[in-house]
Image (spheres, helix red, strand yellow):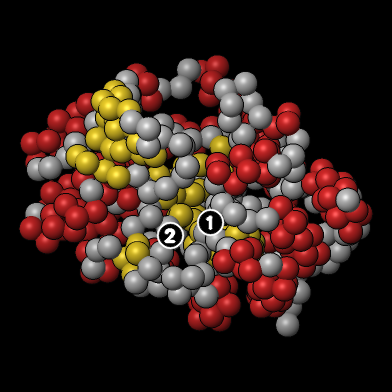
Amino acid sequence: MTDIRRGQGRFGADLTARERFNRTMHYQQVDYVSHLEFGYWTELKEDWMAAGYLPAHLRQPDGSIPDRLVEEFFGVEQFEEFDARIEALPLREVQVLERTENTVTYRDGLGVLRQDKASGTETIPHFLEFPIRDRRSWEAFRDEFLDPDHPARQYTEAEFAALEQLTRNTTNPVTTNLGSFIGRIRDWIGFEQLAYLSMDEPDLIEEMVIHLSQMRLKLFPAVLERGWFDAAGGWEDIAFNSGPLLNPRFFRERIMPHMLPVTQLLRQHGIDVIWTDCDGNILKLIPLWMGIGVNCMFPLEVHPGNDPVALKREYGRELLIRGGFDKFALWQGREAVLAELKRLEPVVAEGGFIPHVDHRCPALVSFDTYCYYIWEKCHMLGWPEERIKAFPFYRRWQELQAS
């Protein structure tokens, strides 16, 4: 069996994070496999900060604790981004309609009426009303928020030049945002209404998908011509634990044909690592995405039934993976963490698979268990022990173990 991990000094100086990412995802030899993660629930960061586990300087003046700073505390390598402005713009001002002791009801920048917990605890919001209900409301939404020619979407030459230089000179891998072709539509319509409209008015849903595709084909070229990219990443979140929200046939016939010209454009500009972020059971969607050039699955949630070991055996080198470490193991303690890492190690060693927690690290994970996870994971990735000990978290972890 091939093992891409060649160890420190294999290439003279250490590979850069950018070199390491590209070589890992192309099944080439590396010094050690890329060390990536996918962020943390706000509640977890606040708990760790209150307990004194995270350094106080990670908190920003606005009160936030950015994921990137927490990841860097754990030695995690980072991406840089240069995106076409393809999301819904410009946003309206948020309107707070009611505030109680427990909830906040408000209309967000896209006109979605929603209710969140007043505590700020991260949960799935309670949606009360969506802006798109029929063709008339879709056309109004499209004209207000999805005009590809709106000035808010344009970069100045100075912005272009700065981002071009960043992508040329950075030692971090660079991504561009593929965006969403159906997940955002779900956000604007609602789960139930999308399911109904996919059956009752499939042409209307397809019209929305076509518009999103055409926006990308118009806005991407200027960015792709200026930037130097290593990957593209999109987002969908269109599956439950039991499978996709919509019939796979709908994806195949009404969505994938309009994604294809976009992925072809990315590949024409040398981007051959393309992922989509989709939670839930995606087994029926994987071959459809792969068929149009989306070849990397992320974060590949294990609990709904996505087994990275089985998938790599099924699809071989055609399938790339980011994620795939079962977050439930973090709640179960050190023994479960080590068992999960050992389960993944053989396919990680083959390349094309960068393991990390299969979603944002959830609440109630102990700091000790997470530190142990980072320690053992980086050893499994082939990182030399002195490098792991140099990560900022290590000293704090040792202090806690000694106390």
| Residue at x 60% of width, y 59% of height | 357
| Residue at x 46% of width, y 36% of height | 119
**Residue 330 spot, x, y in % from top left:** 63, 63
Crowd rating for badge 1 (residues with CA inside 10 Å; few <14, some 14–19, many 20+):
many
Vertical placement of residue 26 versus 131, above or below: below
Vertical placement of residue 172 versus 349, above or below: above
Is 357 placed left or right of 86 in the picture? right
**Residue 51 spot, x, y in % from top left:** 71, 42
Vertical placement of residue 169 versus 271, above or below: above
Residue 264: tell me if it is visible: no
Tag 1 residue: 359
Q: Which of the 4 image quarters holds residue 308?
A: bottom right
Quadrant where the N terminus is found in the figure = bottom right
Is 106 placed left or right of 208 in the picture? right
Q: Which numbered circle lies on residue 279?
A: 2
> Type of residue at label 2?
Asp
Crowd rating for badge 2 (residues with CA inside 10 Å; few <14, some 14–19, many 20+):
many
